[in-house]
Image (cartoon, helix red, strand yellow):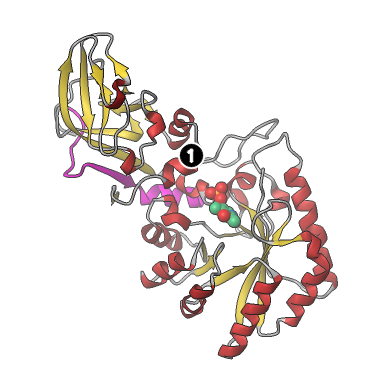
Amino acid sequence: MSERGQRGMPYRSWVEISRAQIAANFQAVRAVVGESVEIMPVVKADAYRHGAVEVSRTLVKEGARWLAVSNTEEGCALREAGIQARILVMADFLPYTRDALIEHELTPVIHSLEGLREFDRLAAARATRLRYHLKIDTGMGRLGVPCSEAAAIGEAILNARNIELEGLMTHFASAGNYQSTQTDEQVAAFDTLLAGLNRAGIFPSLVHLSSTIPVAYGRKQAWRGMIRPGHAIYGYVSPARGHAPAPILHVKPALTWRASVLAVKDIDTGSLVGYGGMFRTQRPTRLAVLAVGYADGIPHRLSNRGSVIVNGKLAPIVGAVSMDLTSVDVTDCPPVEAGDAVTLLGSEGRASIDAQQIAKWAGTISYSVLCGIHARVKRLYV
Ligand SMILES: *Cc1c(COP(=O)(O)O)cnc(C)c1O
């Protein structure tokens, strides 16, 4: 920190990611579920923009044997970076990605019986035995074999002689909503289906249903042998609705997002600020113009809403968020100059803003705030 305030950086905007906090969050999950539950951290979407390669390296060092990504390309990138853990590809099996998937020893989630037969043909043609996880749609209404096809599932699994069912999974639609019975219904549907498979002599060695929320709120009957936390690894647990039990998982954000001040200027009462003259000053105002905008991932909905932290104090965003620039009112903040750094997401002293808070201001969800941080925002590991 310089004498006058926050340390500057030669970047317009950057994120600082704490490997130690990623590790601590993984260990916090480990402490909650115990040693007998396999933790498969979800590092899709470039690890919620925390950087999939660095995050994966950290997690593997902490003992993660599995990682989950969305598509084959994400899995290949991890392999090319030397990651040797098992990698589950959760939401891709487009025909043109299959060779790469097999060559990089990625494990697919299969979502349909036709997909299962196709994967079997692929394995037969290569004369190799391939493992897969099968996703059941227990009520999410998205990817997965619908429970209504239960009768055909066992037969399809048994007929696919060149491939091996390693995992059986489902995904919850309303895990955080304790006013809804949907999660209980999904668990029950899953168990009915699994019992049917067991009667047919099918015993997948890995059964997994839970993302962050069922872990964080202690829905133990959904943990089984494996869990798939994403949000928690990055330090977030979304608030639950209804009569939720107190969370049993405590994690902290691993990412801090900062930006440089480009200019500071004093303007008169009654001046308009930014596109559309959306803001009119009510007093002599000191503005700081930040080198960050919606092209970097600041939600445009933060125009005239929300704040950033300037030298430990909240400074409101004034006027429209522009593509590359955002103006904040620093009249009440300790002195700030061009070249200083401000905090968009993170803590300075007692002031703190997390993705949950930004999401509230912007009318979106914290996942979207994190994933919205653009690739042009420089990433530093601390
Ligand atoms: C993204 C995802 C997860 C992780 O969810 P979080 O809420 O971030 O923990 C788990 N499972 C599936 C199928 C997902 O798509």
**Quadrant assignment, res 303:** top left
> Type of residue at label 1?
Ser
Give coordinates of residue 225: x percent, y percent: 66, 61
Q: Nearer the viewer, residue 113 or 42?
A: 113
Give coordinates of residue 367: x percent, y percent: 49, 43
Residue under the image location 68 percent in, 78 percent down: 117
Quadrant for the N terminus in the image: top left
Assess disc 1: are there few (<14), some (14-19) or many (≥20) residues with their C-alpha within 10 Å of its C-alpha. many
**Quadrant assignment, res 116:** bottom right
Whether residue 30 is visible here, answered yes or no, is: no
Q: Where is mark 1, residue-wise?
A: 366
Q: Is residue 227 above or below residue 217?
A: below
SS class, disc 1: helix
Residue under the image location 45 percent in, 59 percent down: 59
Q: Specify whether residue 11 is painted magenta.
A: yes
Residue under the image location 20 percent in, 18 percent down: 286
Whether residue 23 is visible here, answered yes or no, is: yes
Q: Nearer the viewer, residue 136 or 230?
A: 136
Say if disc 1 is inside 8 Å of ligand 1: no
Q: Is residue 302 above or below residue 85?
A: above
Give coordinates of residue 211: x percent, y percent: 60, 51
User: In this rendering, would 370 be left or right of 314?
Assistant: right
Residue under the image location 49 percent in, 74 percent down: 96
User: In this rendering, would 48 be left or right of 327?
Assistant: right
Give coordinates of residue 169: x percent, y percent: 67, 61
What is the span of residues highlighted in magenta in the rendered image? 5-27
Q: Specify whether residue 114 is painted magenta.
A: no
